Image (spheres, rainbow, N blue to C red):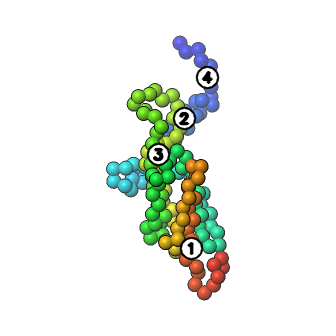
Amino acid sequence: MDLTPWNPWQELERVQGQVDDLLASVLAKLRNVVPGKAIAFVPATDIIELAGEYRLYLSLPGIVEEDIDITLEADILIVRGEREAPYESDQAMVHQAQWKYGYFERRIHLPRPVEEDSIHASYDAGVLTIRVPKVPAEGGKEGES
């Protein structure tokens, strides 16, 4: 008989984890765009539009910069990579795991043409910042649309 008092918050966290895992599984199947690689997670992303560029901020803690790939296919900016667990799960008993490890991919539709050769990315403190300059609008200064 277990004499541990019932903790409703712990139970809610357990259920939330199960729902998150279920949604991630469904999304991975729907977004399995790289043969043999299921998407383990989709990084949180902020996308802002400024007068002359789009700026994207992706939360990628624990990922090595060299493991991040950024490509542009038509009007879709694609960010891919992989986060490896800092431990061997088959050699340890994991009591709690909230981070998602494995392959990730984020596809962002850009609503206006961009200058592909001028895309710039930087990575600092687990945040990937991508600056995507817009092609200036014809017949007017940038910022007028």
Above-or-below relation of 6 to 29 = above
In the image, taking residue 39 as reference, residue 123 lies left or right, namely right
Q: Which residue is mark 1?
A: 134
Above-or-below relation of 26 to 137 = above
| Earlier sequence position, callout 2 versus callout 4 | 4
Q: CA distance from mark 1 to mark 2?
A: 43 Å
* Residue 21, numbered label: none
User: Around disc 4, counting alpha carbons within 10 Å, would you say few (fewer than 14), some (14 to 19), or many (20 or more)?
Assistant: few
In depth, the one of 26 and 35 nearer the eye is: 35
Q: Position of residue 141 (x, y in %)?
A: 64, 82
Q: Amino acid at mark 2?
A: Val
Tell me the quarter of the image containing the C terminus: bottom right
| Earlier sequence position, callout 3 versus callout 4 | 4
Q: Quick one: SS at disc 3?
A: strand
Q: CA distance from mark 4 to mark 1?
A: 55 Å
Whether residue 22 is visible here, answered yes or no, is no
User: Around disc 3, counting alpha carbons within 10 Å, would you say few (fewer than 14), some (14 to 19), or many (20 or more)?
Assistant: many
* Residue 83, numbered label: 3
In depth, the one of 113 and 124 nearer the eye is: 124
Q: Residue furthest bottom?
A: 139
Q: Which residue is mark 4?
A: 6
Q: CA distance from mark 3 to mark 4?
A: 34 Å
User: Around disc 1, counting alpha carbons within 10 Å, would you say few (fewer than 14), some (14 to 19), or many (20 or more)?
Assistant: many
Q: Which residue is mark 2?
A: 15
Q: CA distance from mark 2 to mark 4?
A: 15 Å
Which residue corresponds to the image point at 65% horizontal and 76% vertical from the top-left? Answer: 143
